[in-house]
Amino acid sequence: MASDTEIESLFGQFKKAYQRFLEALKEKPHPLQQDAVIQRFEFTYELLWKTFKKMARFHKVQAFSPRECFKFAFQAGLIEDEKLFMEIIDARNMTTHVYSEEEMKKIYEFIRQKVAEGFNQVQKKIEQNLKAESK
């Protein structure tokens, strides 16, 4: 079973990755910056779903895949917009198989317009959850 310490450690890594992701988004758009944003998105996404996986284990819920972990997070009230996070999962899956510049630009725009705010909302919810559970 996952411990509070394991969850807090992984969540701390998520918060650092999220800050680096935001830093990359602030740069003036150009191909190298877009690549950096997508890479930072991938790191941040991976840490988020793994944080949810630890939280699910802590609550004795079996969730193994990213999709199952995001569904757990929605059911636990950590995600408000389930549809957005299903789109985020799809975007992450697409980053592995992007070979055209046009597709890369579509993913970049989705990340820039939607993902940063979605991650921000989730970060706040997890912080509230961790505070509530530590009492």
Image (tube, helix red, strand yellow):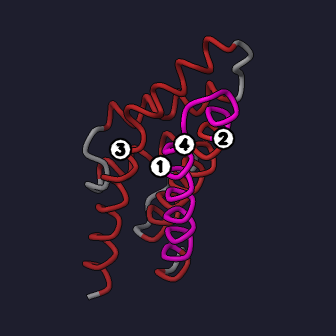
User: Which residues are drawn in magenta?
Assistant: 7-36
Which residue position is annotated with label 1?
A: 69
Q: Quadrant of the N terminus?
A: bottom right
Q: Which residue: 52% across, 83% down?
A: 5
Predominant SS of the magenta segment: helix
**According to the image, label 4 marks what residue?**
27
Compared across the picture, whether 101 is left or right of 120 comes to: right
In the displayed image of the protein, which residue is found farthest to the front? 28
Residue 34 in the image: above or below residue 36: above
**x, y percentage for residue 129?**
29, 70
Camera-nearest label, 2 or 1: 2
> What's under tag 3, amino acid-wise?
Gly
Of residues 32 and 76, the one drawn nearer to the viewer in this rendering: 32
Give the residue drawn at x 49%, y 64%: 15
Spatial separation of the CA atoms under disc 3 and disc 4:
20 Å
The residue drawn where x is 56% and y is 31% is 29
Name the outermost residue toward the bottom: 135
